[in-house]
Image (tube, rainbow, N blue to C red):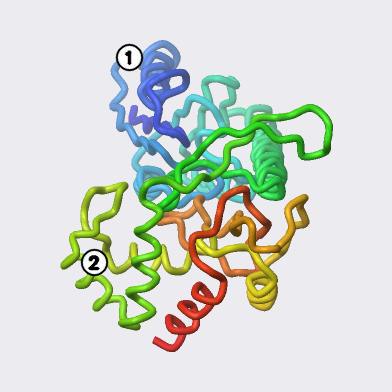
Amino acid sequence: MRVALYARKSVLSETGESVKNQIRMCRDYVATFLSPSAEITEFCDDGYSAKDTNRPAFKAMMTSVKNFDFVVCYRLDRLSRNVVDFCTIAQTTDSLGVKLVCIREHFDTSTPMGRAMMYMASVFAQLERETIAQRVKDNMLLLAQNGQWMGGTSPVGYSAAKIEFSPSGDAKKTFTVLKCDENAYIPKIIFDTYSHLRSLSATYRDLEKKNIVSPHTKKPFSRQGIYSLLTNPVYSVADGDMYSWLSGIGCTIKPCLRSWDGHYGVSVYNRRNYSKHGAPKNIPSSWVVTVGFHSGIISSADWINVQNILRKG
């Protein structure tokens, strides 16, 4: 008997339903209910979502699935949280005579009832994924509208800080916001240098000559790092000119209690798609923009001027 064990976890972890624990429980199931002498091959995706099938170990398993008698996983949503993808998986394994077993739900496609229950469970798995995703998106939009920092690595020149603020005039709440730190001079130098030299490569060489390094890596800025800094709206003051420029490229401007009067900086949500490898930039029409709590380091005129130079280059 040949058995493929599949394990997946979205977030790298050694606790709870970690990949290691999933494999251990699947091995115990195979030894107890299938065959103690089964030939087992493990396929593990650690740090991958089940929203689609773009997972290296999963792809490898499905490529060779015809070589197995069983595919065993800890739970159905380890395989997929998408109904269409699950139907494709089930149809593929069924056509090859390979049985799917999910040990947590006690699903087994070797029986008609097991197949029916597994299809039903896949519907609810997708519903759960979409509900969680919408809840997270709604919460992040609310945070963005209030100008809060969403977390992650702070932009060069800023640090995350806690403040107390009352968004609706009632009880104060603790918010995470950006504050200028001791490295705020670095973005100014980069903007000034690029505005003068009008070249990313020349700016890179000039920064290297001046020994200006990234506070995050303690290494020289890469050309891509310079470009990312120059195109980040967080550095601009939030004034009327910036409002018009962002509106002009299709951004969604969220209202807030702070006005676009130049006293604060720009806060942007959904600028990058972190569900994809490398977190590529979303198109501007996907951006949600408001006024943050932080001070803008670069004037809107200088920030917009740099964008125009970059476009021409």
Residue 268 appears in the picture as rendered: no
* Distance from Cα at disc 2 to Cα at disc 1: 63 Å
Which residue is the extreme one toward the bottom? 312
Label 2 environment density (alpha carbons within 10 Å; few <14, some 14–19, many ≥20): many
The dot on residue 171 is none
- Residue 67 is drawn in which quadrant? top left
User: Eyeballing the image, is 21 above or below 162?
Assistant: above
Label 1 environment density (alpha carbons within 10 Å; few <14, some 14–19, many ≥20): few
Q: Which residue is mark 1?
A: 36
Instruction: Specify whether 302 is left or right of 263.
Output: left
Q: Which residue is mark 2?
A: 207
- Residue 190 is drawn in which quadrant? bottom left
Q: Nearer the viewer, residue 312 or 73?
A: 312
- Whichever of labels 2 and 1 marks the residue nearer the N terminus, that label is 1
Q: Nearer the viewer, residue 99 or 14?
A: 14
Residue shown at the point (67%, 37%) measured from the top left: 132
Residue 193 appears in the picture as rendered: yes
